[in-house]
């Protein structure tokens, strides 16, 4: 991200102007709503304003898995609106992530709205039962997302979730599967966080040098097909 003083002043002004908006949205929807303002220039403490307590975060807290994914996509990322996710505590949230861009179009933050719809889901289940069990057409259940003030806990949760999906330990994975694990973690923005490689290495029980090596190979394998694609740069 460009560290131009003029752009930084512009970004600071945008963040400052959105402070009252955070409070206003949360007040409009009441206690089931949480609004979080992120400044992605500081991933480990990206929360600069928060109103409501749906996910229990506070100013100075870290970005979530969703924020890390946006960070990985950079300026190519887009708004994510009206999606469902679930907290580790089981709350069902309807959320929107609206990106903040400066005058050059660079993404530097996000305004996030989380509404706890757990009670609505429970009431709907009761009504469906009374009505004879008619389906809601809700589709696939949302995955669990880690929200926390500590970036380390977010990174560890992502690593653990990827390991769980593999259904095998690190030592049981073949080379291709290990590279895929690192590629997927990279796509989720894990390695955009300071000290993340060391943390992933510790979580997997491998050396830091091995982790850097796998990450380098995963990135090389990802970049090679694109280089021969012949499409626009």
Image: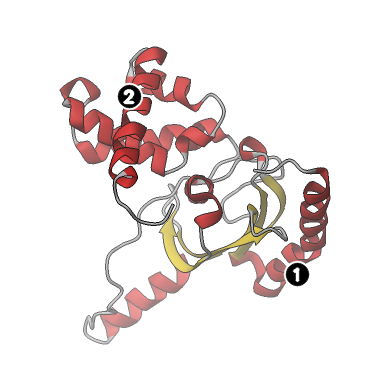
Query: Dot 1, how many residues are within 10 Å of its Cα: few (below 14), some (14-19), or many (20+)?
Result: few
In the rendered image, which residue does mark 1 sit on? 24
Q: Where's the N terminus, which quadrant?
A: top right
**Can you tell which of label 2 and label 1 is closer to the viewer?**
2
The answer to whether residue 163 shows anywhere in this view is: no
Horizontal and vertical percent position of residue 89: 44, 49
Is residue 105 in sight in this rendering? yes
Above or below residue 102? Residue 154 is: above
Q: Nearer the viewer, residue 120 or 8?
A: 8
Q: Which quadrant of the figure has residue 165?
A: top left
* Residue 136 falls in image quadrant: bottom left
Q: Residue at x 51, y 57 (%)?
A: 77
Binning the other alpha carbons within 10 Å of mark 2 as few (below 14), some (14 to 19) or many (20 upward) gives some
**Viewer-nearest residue: 231 or 135:** 231
Position of residue 138 measured from the top left corner of the image (x, y, whole percent)? 31, 74
Give the SS element for disc 1: helix
Locate residue 65 relative to residue 131 in the image: left or right.
right
Q: Residue at x 38, y 51 (%)?
A: 144
Q: In the rendered structure, find residue 200 and report the number of the disc placed on it.
A: none
Q: Give the labeled residue for mark 2.
A: 214
Q: Decide which of 50, 182 is in the foreground and name it.
A: 182
The structure residue drawn at horizontal position 75% and vertical position 64%, both measured from the top left corner, is 23
Q: Position of residue 66 (x, y in %)?
A: 49, 51
* Residue in front for this viewpoint, 141 or 37: 37
């Amino acid at each position: 991200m460009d560290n131009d003083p003029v752009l930084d002043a512009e970004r600071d002004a945008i963040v400052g102007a959105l402070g009252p908006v955070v409070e206003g949205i949360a007040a409009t929807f009441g206690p089931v709503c949480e609004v979080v303002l992120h400044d992605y220039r500081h991933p480990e403490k990206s929360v600069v304003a928060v109103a409501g307590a749906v996910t229990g975060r506070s100013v100075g807290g870290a970005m979530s898995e969703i924020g890390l994914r946006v960070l990985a996509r950079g300026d190519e990322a887009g708004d994510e609106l009206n999606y469902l996710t679930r907290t580790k505590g089981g709350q069902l949230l309807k959320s929107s992530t609206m990106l903040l861009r400066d005058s050059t179009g660079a993404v530097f933050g996000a305004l996030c709205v989380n509404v706890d719809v757990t009670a609505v889901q429970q009431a709907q289940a009761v009504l469906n039962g009374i009505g004879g069990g008619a389906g809601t057409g809700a589709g696939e259940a949302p995955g669990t997302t880690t929200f926390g003030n500590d970036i380390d806990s977010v990174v560890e949760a992502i690593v653990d979730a990827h390991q769980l999906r593999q259904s095998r330990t690190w030592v049981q994975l073949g080379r291709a599967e290990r590279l895929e694990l690192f590629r997927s973690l990279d796509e989720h923005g894990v390695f955009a966080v300071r000290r993340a490689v060391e943390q992933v290495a510790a979580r997997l029980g491998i050396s830091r040098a091995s982790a850097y090596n796998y990450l380098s190979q995963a990135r090389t394998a990802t970049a090679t097909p694109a280089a021969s694609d012949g499409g626009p740069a």
